[in-house]
């Protein structure tokens, strides 16, 4: 086999793999279309209680940390700002419109060690468990790696203060 033939075969295999990945992602987006999209930030989100920089790792279906949600604004990793206000949590993920989690949608907040494509030291991730409203209500978990470890406890405390008393008890992922 000459060099041109082997190069052509490698290029074709790489292109087929890329096409397969694109088709798989689009199929996942179609499957998750009924989940809806995160709310836009309201005109008056309330006073800021706490804000921190972080790295957004993923949003997954509740208690399924290896099943990424593919909806607008939550499908890809990136730098993020988490802002806790008196009415909810604002997620400012780079490259996407800001998303808003109203306090009524919050279920839990805690520390985690892993999610899809991210494993850190014990308790190194913050997971916000919340309900995404679309055609149906779906419980999801959003994972963040807070840039400054000193912000972990204040962030968790600020969000915990917003969780409704009737929120579903139990652990997030």
Image: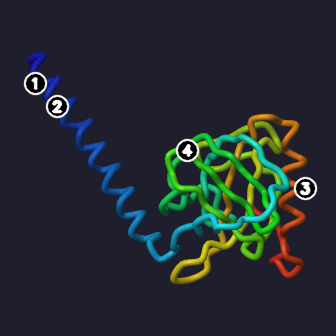
Residue 20, position as x, y percentages in the image: 30, 50
Q: Nearer the viewer, mark 2 or mark 3?
A: 3
Q: Secondary structure at mark 1?
A: helix
Q: CA distance from mark 1 to mark 4?
A: 42 Å
Q: Are marks 3 and 1 in contact (CB under 8 Å)?
A: no
Could you tell me which secondary element the residue under label 2 belongs to?
Answer: helix
Residue 94 - label: 4
Residue closest to the eye, 44 or 116: 44
The residue nearer to you, when weighing 128 against 170, is: 128
Residue labelled with disc 2: 9
Which residue is disc 1 drawn over? 5
- Distance in Å between CA atoms under marks 3 and 4: 24 Å
Kindly check if marks 2 and 1 are in contact, taking CB atoms under 8 A apart as contact. Answer: yes
Task: Using residue 42 as the reference point, say whether residue 161 is left or right of it.
Answer: right
> Circle 1: is it few (<14), some (14-19), or many (20+) Cα within 10 Å?
few
Residue 90 x/y as whole percent:
68, 58
CB atoms of marks 2 and 3 within 8 Å: no
Secondary structure under tag 3 reads: helix
């Amino acid at each position: 086999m000459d060099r041109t033939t082997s190069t052509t075969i490698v290029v074709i295999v790489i292109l087929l793999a890329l096409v397969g990945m694109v088709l798989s992602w689009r199929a996942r987006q179609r499957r998750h279309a009924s989940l809806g999209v995160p709310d836009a930030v309201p005109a008056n989100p309330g006073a800021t209680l706490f804000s921190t920089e972080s790295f957004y790792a993923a949003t997954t279906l509740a208690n399924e940390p290896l099943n990424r949600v593919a909806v607008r604004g939550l499908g890809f990793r990136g730098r993020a700002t988490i802002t806790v206000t008196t009415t909810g949590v604002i997620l400012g993920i780079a490259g996407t419109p800001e998303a808003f989690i109203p306090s009524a949608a919050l279920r839990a907040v805690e520390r985690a060690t892993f999610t899809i494509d991210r494993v850190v030291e014990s308790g190194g991730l913050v997971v916000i468990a919340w309900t995404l409203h679309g055609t149906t209500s779906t419980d999801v978990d959003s994972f963040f790696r807070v840039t400054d470890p000193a912000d972990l406890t204040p962030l968790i405390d600020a969000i915990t203060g917003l969780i409704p008393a009737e929120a579903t008890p139990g652990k997030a992922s």
